[in-house]
């Protein structure tokens, strides 16, 4: 019985990308990508610069529309849905090159993240501090270490804290699927450790599913349940951290053919 | 609660003083001063309207004299056509201006920055042409007589009589603007101003926000037009042109773009400056221009940010 249930759950991935192809003019940025993300997992999407990670990411969050293929989320085909409907479905994203509301306070940034929840009643909609939501915002600021910056303009924060605002704002959507594009890029070691802890907690305590595009291998290898490796728009490997790390194709893609050869004979 | 910071002592004293002066004004001054006060209060509301679209949503509009004019004509004509209390005519003016604003907002969706500025400028010019040439409705270049506003048995025949109503409607509009700004709608406006892509990712309908902000902004400008009819007996299309739009734009920008207090303060300070300069008509434009340049050089973030900075410096003994 238990085994059957588990089989049923693994059979239908929470996020299913099938045959995803994205062309820009003559350039095929992503070609026929298949990727299945299991519910409650942290799934990393890695690959060298220009591999097509952000392009894939932007398709899933519906900022780009694929040339071919299908994206299924929680049993629903979202391939052609408008981007602004994603938040309502529980899909939240961050931006690789920060897209904060710079002139607004950190508090207001995160409060706007809760936009889809702030209009349940007329009273909530006209309130500057809608009930139930403000408490959630405060909790998120606490969890992301931003409480003391609540009234600071986002533009005046240092880079590490700005990245945290991106995450806190995405979490205010109360997402089921969190898409993060290089959240660790440019962070210091201590900040990466905090991010590592936060993401694990989101998976364990909140049951979030996280798709992580990331170059910082220290983070990817420590928290990912599964890793998909892209190179020049195609998938070259997939598996657990250990499997991917040992895969010669991956080493070659990252280090070049000669280095891969040396690594194999070391 | 940090988000609801209490008013500081100085600000509170200033506010109380302003209210006392505003309320007592007609008691100890001449009709002319009251007339200027009425006009300034109308400009405050006009600036609040422009604030919604430029300050909150970050979209250019160079057409606010047109929305104001639509409000003036629509409420004056409604007031003449049906025998209802004047506020109904004012609401009608706001609604007509708001509807035109929604339409312009929808057309403006595909435009940005300088293109949007030019397109709204063209609309403003076109509307002024309509005011001046639609003889059967606006009485064309001869201007339109505005019949006195009535509130039940009270008929308003003087500036002093009109003043309490003008002040009241101005305060209502300030309250409304603050409420919009603090609400979910206001937050979505600012989100669109700061980053359209991030706003979209938060589930905000960016197109709708842009259209609604245009409509609201135009409706408030139209309401200012209705307020104008409370104490004015005559409207001429000449006063609804580009100069008026630029004056309002100046008030909002110099007061402090993005802040309601800035829009109000800008309207009062620059309204007073242009009124004083009227005493010396031969130098009016050059002095006005010089003041504007000085403001842009020394207080680029606006009058209020400038004063705030000076106060803070004085406190910290620098
Ligand atoms: N909007 C676009 N128009 C044209 N080409 C694009 C566009 N977006 C991405 N590309 C191209 O698609 C390819 C994949 O880019 P993408 O940003 O997805 O890479 P990435 O894997 O995220 O790289 P990085 O690690 O540097 O962020 C690149 O060659 C890029 O130049
Ligand atoms: Mg990228």
Image: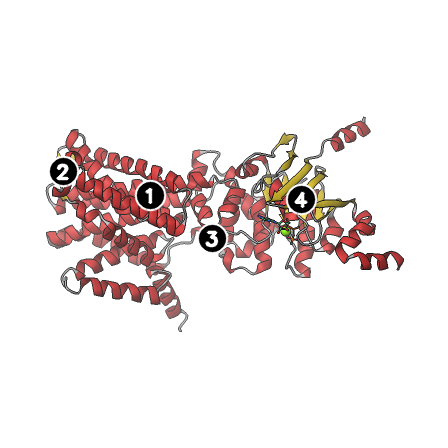
Q: Is residue B47 visible?
A: yes
| Image spot of residue A265 (x, y percent) | 89, 58
Say which residue label 1 marks.
B217
In front: mark 4 or mark 1? 4
Q: Earlier in the sequence, mark 4 or mark 3?
A: 4
Label 1, residues with CA under 10 Å away: few <14, some 14-19, many ≥20:
many
Report the Cα–Cα distance between label 4 and label 1. Answer: 44 Å
Say which residue label 2 marks.
B139
- Say which of A234 and A150 sits in front: A234
| Parent chain of label 2 | B
Q: Are marks 4 and 1 on the same chain?
A: no
Q: Is residue A126 above or below residue B269?
A: above
| Parent chain of label 1 | B
Report the Cα–Cα distance between label 4 and label 3. Answer: 36 Å
Secondary structure beneath disc 4? strand
Secondary structure beneath disc 2? loop
**Is the CB of the residue bearing disc 1 within 8 angstroms of ligand 1?**
no
| Image spot of residue B57 (x, y percent) | 41, 47
Q: Find the residue positioned furthest to the front.
A: A26
**Is the CB of the residue bearing disc 4 within 8 angstroms of ligand 1?**
yes
- Say which of A130 and A243 sits in front: A243
Label 3, residues with CA under 10 Å away: few <14, some 14-19, many ≥20:
many
In front: mark 2 or mark 4? 4
Q: Find the residue positioned furthest to the bottom.
A: B318
Looking at the rendered structure, which numbered label has been put on residue A191? none
| Image spot of residue A147 (x, y percent) | 56, 54
Secondary structure beneath disc 3? loop
Say which residue label 4 marks.
A30
In front: mark 1 or mark 3? 1
| Parent chain of label 4 | A
In front: mark 4 or mark 3? 4
Looking at the rendered structure, which numbered label has been put on residue A104? 3
């Amino acid at each position: 019985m238990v085994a059957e249930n588990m089989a049923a759950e693994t059979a239908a991935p929470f996020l299913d990308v099938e045959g995803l192809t994205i062309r820009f003019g003559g350039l095929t940025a992503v070609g026929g990508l298949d990727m299945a993300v299991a519910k409650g997992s942290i799934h990393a999407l890695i690959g060298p610069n220009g591999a097509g990670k952000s392009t894939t990411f932007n398709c899933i969050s519906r900022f780009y529309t694929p040339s071919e293929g299908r994206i299924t989320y929680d049993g629903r085909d979202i391939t052609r849905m408008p981007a602004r409907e994603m938040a309502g479905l529980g899909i939240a994203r961050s931006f690789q090159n920060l897209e904060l509301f710079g002139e607004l306070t950190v508090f207001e940034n995160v409060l706007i993240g809760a936009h889809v929840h702030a209009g349940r009643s007329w009273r909530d909609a006209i309130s500057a501090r809608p009930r139930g939501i403000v408490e959630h915002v405060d909790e998120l600021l606490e969890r992301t270490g931003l409480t003391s910056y609540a009234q600071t303009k986002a533009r005046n924060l240092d880079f590490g804290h700005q990245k945290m605002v991106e995450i806190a704002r995405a979490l205010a959507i109360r997402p089921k699927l969190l898409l993060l594009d290089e959240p660790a890029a440019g962070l210091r070691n201590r900040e990466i450790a905090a991010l590592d802890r936060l993401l694990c907690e989101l998976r364990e305590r909140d049951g979030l599913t996280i798709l992580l595009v990331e170059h910082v291998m220290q983070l990817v290898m420590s928290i990912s349940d599964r890793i998909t490796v892209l190179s020049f728009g195609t998938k070259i490997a997939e598996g657990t951290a250990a499997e991917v790390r040992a895969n010669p194709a991956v080493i070659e893609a990252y280090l070049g053919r000669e280095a891969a050869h040396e690594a194999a004979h070391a | 609660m940090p988000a609801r910071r209490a008013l500081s002592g100085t600000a509170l004293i200033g506010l109380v003083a302003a209210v006392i002066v505003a309320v007592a004004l007609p008691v100890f001054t001449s009709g002319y001063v009251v007339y200027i006060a009425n006009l300034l209060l109308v400009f405050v509301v006009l600036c609040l309207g422009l604030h919604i679209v430029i300050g909150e949503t970050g979209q250019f509009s160079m057409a606010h004299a047109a929305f104001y004019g639509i409000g003036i004509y629509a409420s004056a004509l409604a007031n003449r056509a049906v025998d209802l209390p004047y506020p109904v005519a004012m609401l009608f003016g706001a609604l007509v201006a708001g509807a035109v604003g929604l339409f312009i907002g929808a057309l403006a969706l595909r435009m940005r920055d300088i293109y949007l500025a030019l397109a709204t400028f063209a609309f403003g010019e076109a509307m002024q042409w309509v005011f001046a040439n639609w003889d059967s409705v606006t009485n064309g270049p001869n201007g339109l007589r505005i019949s006195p506003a009535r509130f039940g048995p009270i008929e308003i025949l003087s500036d002093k009589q009109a003043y309490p109503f003008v002040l009241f409607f101005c305060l209502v509009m300030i309250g409304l603007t603050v409420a919009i700004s603090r609400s979910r709608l206001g937050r979505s406006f600012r989100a669109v101003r700061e980053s359209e892509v991030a706003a979209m990712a938060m589930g905000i309908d960016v197109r709708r926000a842009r259209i609604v902000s245009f409509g609201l902004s135009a409706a408030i400008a139209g309401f200012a037009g209705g307020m104008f009819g409370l104490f004015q007996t005559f409207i001429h299309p000449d006063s609804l042109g580009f100069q008026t739009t630029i004056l309002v734009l100046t008030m909002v920008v110099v007061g402090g773009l993005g802040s309601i207090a800035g829009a109000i303060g800008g309207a009062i300070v620059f309204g007073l400056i242009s009124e004083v300069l009227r005493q010396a008509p031969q130098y009016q434009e050059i002095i006005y221009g010089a003041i504007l340049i000085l403001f842009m050089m020394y207080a680029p973030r606006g009058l209020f940010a400038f004063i705030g900075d000076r106060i803070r410096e004085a406190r910290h003994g620098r």
